[in-house]
Amino acid sequence: MVRSLPFAASIAVVAIAAAALARAEFVPERKYEEVIDPATPVSGHAVVGAIVVPARQQDRQSDKLWVHVGKASLPSRIRVDVASASGRLHGEGTWVFKAGPNDKGPWYALTVPPKSTRPEPLAVGVQLAASADPATPTFLVAALSQSAPAAARQLRLFVNARGAEMFAYPPAGDAVKCEPVTQARTIRFDVTCDIDIPGGAQAGSAKVLLVRRDGNSTSRQPLELRW
């Protein structure tokens, strides 16, 4: 009887360790990789990225990307795209969600190691790998930092306005005029738009309308944000 106690204790330790490891997480499907001077520097998409306004400039060098997802809207597969305004740096990878009893959400960590020193500004976009409506891109709220943000109140959109004026219309509040990127060479994006996350960091979704004005010409680009 006494001799069986160590074995029983070992089984208990293994069971506890297994439960701790069975956590809900995004696991890599296609390993994230960054490329310098890609063959195709332009994506052709108006909205390049959406990320929590960084608290520190050095956060863009982080190898951790945090994705904020509510349990009611957990996607099965996501794609991450990272790009510099000049188009000289491009990173991408895909992840699939693995369910588990140990769910530490709503922030889920992804590993995105930098190839070299990342330039500023840097766009990061986390999207559903398969969008139900390609005309309305869906971006998940994400943050590039070593630790999950304590609060996420403002989101920065990275947009290719092609030299025109761009305005962001959130679901509530006034329109936001996007600011031009102060960089000589802008290929992937040329403006950023800082908007408040509706309802703060509570799980939800919202539609944002981007309006591009170029002289007498006006065009609109809707997008959806999820968090």
Image (spheres, rainbow, N blue to C red):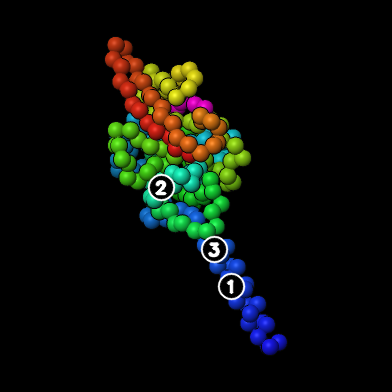
Q: What element carries label 2?
A: loop
- Residue 217 seen in the current view: yes
Q: Identify residue for label 3.
A: 21
The amino acid on which the numbered mark 2 sits, given as a three-letter code, is Pro
- Please state the horizontal and vertical placement of residue 217, each as a whole percent of the image: 28, 15
Q: Quadrant of residue 190?
A: top left
Q: Does residue 221 lie above or below 75 as drawn?
A: above
The answer to whether the residues at label 3 and label 1 have Cβ atoms under 8 Å apart is no
**Distance in Å between CA atoms under marks 2 and 3:** 21 Å
Q: What residue type is labelled 1?
A: Val
Picture layout, residue 121 above or below residue 4: above
> What residue would you read off at disc 1?
14
Query: Sequence order check: which comes first, mark 2 or mark 3?
Result: 3
Dividing the picture into quadrants, the one containing residue 125 is: top left
Tell me the kind of residue under disc 3: Leu
* Cα–Cα span, label 1 and label 2: 31 Å
Range of the magenta residues? Answer: 192-196
